[in-house]
Image (cartoon, rainbow, N blue to C red):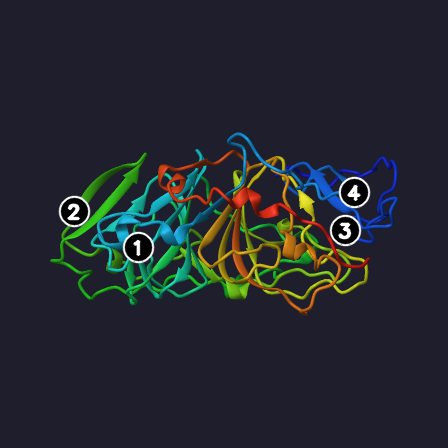
């Protein structure tokens, strides 16, 4: 991310505009509502302009070509680890810095996996059990983010037959965002972070053949031990360790007078991508303020959202386990039904849990993803028009 602490925003103003972004949108010549588009740089961190349209900016009638949004129902993916405990997740989006996949492991891993080049995030969509790591044991349940640092042997020991993980594989260390003016305990208090507790066996598991499978550049090398390396450590100290938080521990920033951008919900980051958590929050309450996301292109980041639970208020016909993929530069915003509530919501709070991953470099759909994408998704914005009152 660029450092914008000393950037002074001095906008040019032409034509009929709003005095404050995302609030009191100007009317067109017919006295009807206009539609605000945010055209910004560096995600939501850099320079920005706001344009006010007579017609919704997503009012295209058809798209010809490959540059379009995609809907991936990960429930239709069949990871090999679902039936073979020796196997691994299936991936659906990737670039040189990050890979996104699904694991549905139902049985204990018969080996420890050691990622030699990548940090890992396992987001628990379903199931509960334990991660046995070199540092000790770390339990998991629905909604947990489990972070595994590069070079840490671990294995998953499910306690339920149905387990469902969103897996994020990073070539850089997973970092916690700087809270800046909000203070160090905002978003989630570091005190909510849990780390493994050593659980050694009296003899370190001596006499038990243990395999540590080393993964490097998609090739695997197995090391064999005559003791259990995950039950051989009696203690540890330091700040390199597996750790976890739960999405329910995330406390969103809110404003009753301003619709905050997704970056306000940043949970983890690297130089190549950010991970944001969408959780229930109060809607904006001031009259005239937008109560749904504004139209935007996010011109320098690909946007991926994994829908975990609840009802996502800006999307129509989205179910748990689905993923939306909006490539950088694709102009998007609320779906037609959501648009009707842009100035007035019928509930006090959102009801959603979702994980967003924004990547600086373009993502590619894998073969497995291309086989299940919904070709109709780009049509979901057709007919969007605000029919309510200003």
Residue 4 visible somewhere in the drawing: no
| Residue linked to disc 1 | 134
Mark 3 → mark 1, Cα distance in angstroms: 49 Å
Percent x, y for residue 271? 54, 39
In terms of sequence position, does the residue under pointer 3 or pointer 2 come before the other? Answer: 3
Secondary element at image label 4 = loop
Secondary element at image label 3 = loop
Comparing 187 with 57, the one in front is 57
Instruction: Note whether 330 is above or below 71 in the view shown.
Output: above
Query: Is 214 left, or right, of 353 in this rendering?
Result: left
- As drawn, the label of residue 54 is 4
Mark 3 → mark 2, Cα distance in angstroms: 59 Å
Instruction: Tell me whether the residue at label 3 lies in contact with that at label 1, contact meaning CB atoms closer than 8 angstroms.
Output: no
Percent x, y for residue 53? 77, 41
| Residue linked to disc 2 | 224
Mark 3 against mark 4, which lies toward the viewer? Answer: 4
Instruction: Note whether 4 is above or below 322 in the view shown.
Output: above
Mark 3 neighbour class, 10 Å CA radius: few under 14, some 14 to 19, many 20 or more: many
Question: Picture quarter containing residue 236?
Answer: bottom left
Residue 45 visible somewhere in the drawing: yes
In terms of sequence position, does the residue under pointer 1 or pointer 4 come before the other? Answer: 4
Query: Is 321 left, or right, of 313 in this rendering?
Result: left
């Amino acid at each position: 991310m660029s450092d914008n602490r000393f950037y002074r925003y001095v906008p040019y103003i032409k034509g009929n505009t709003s005095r404050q972004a995302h609030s009191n949108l100007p009317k067109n010549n017919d006295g009807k509502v206009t539609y605000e588009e945010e055209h910004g740089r560096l995600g939501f961190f850099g320079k920005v302009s706001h344009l006010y349209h007579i017609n919704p900016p997503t009012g295209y009638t058809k798209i010809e070509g490959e540059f379009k949004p995609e809907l991936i129902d990960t429930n239709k993916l069949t990871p090999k680890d679902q039936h073979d405990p020796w196997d691994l997740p299936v991936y659906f989006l990737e670039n040189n810095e990050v890979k996104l996949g699904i694991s549905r492991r139902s049985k204990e891993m018969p080996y420890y996996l050691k990622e030699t080049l990548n940090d890992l995030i396992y987001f628990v969509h379903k199931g509960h059990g334990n991660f046995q790591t070199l540092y000790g044991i770390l339990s998991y349940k629905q909604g947990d983010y489990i972070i595994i640092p590069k070079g840490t042997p671990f294995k998953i020991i499910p306690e339920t037959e149905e387990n469902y993980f969103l897996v994020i594989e990073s070539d850089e260390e997973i970092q916690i965002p700087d809270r800046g003016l909000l203070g160090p305990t905002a978003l989630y208090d570091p005190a909510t972070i849990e780390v493994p507790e050593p659980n050694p066996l009296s003899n370190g598991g001596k006499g038990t053949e243990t395999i540590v499978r080393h993964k490097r550049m998609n090739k695997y090398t197995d090391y064999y031990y005559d003791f259990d390396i995950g039950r051989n450590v009696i203690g540890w100290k330091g700040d390199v360790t597996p750790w976890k938080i739960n999405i329910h521990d995330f406390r969103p920033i809110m404003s009753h007078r301003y619709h905050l951008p997704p970056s306000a919900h940043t949970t983890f980051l690297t130089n190549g991508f950010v991970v944001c958590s969408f959780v229930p929050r109060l809607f904006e309450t001031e009259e005239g303020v937008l109560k749904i996301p504004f139209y935007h292109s996010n011109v320098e980041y690909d946007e991926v959202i994994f829908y975990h639970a609840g009802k996502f208020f800006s999307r129509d016909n989205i179910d748990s386990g689905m993923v939306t993929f909006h490539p950088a530069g694709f102009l998007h915003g609320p779906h037609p039904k959501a648009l009707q509530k842009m100035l007035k919501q019928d509930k006090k709070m959102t009801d959603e849990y979702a994980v967003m991953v924004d990547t600086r470099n373009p993502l590619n759909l894998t073969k497995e993803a291309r086989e299940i994408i919904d070709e109709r998704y780009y049509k979901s914005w057709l007919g969007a028009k605000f029919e309510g009152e200003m």
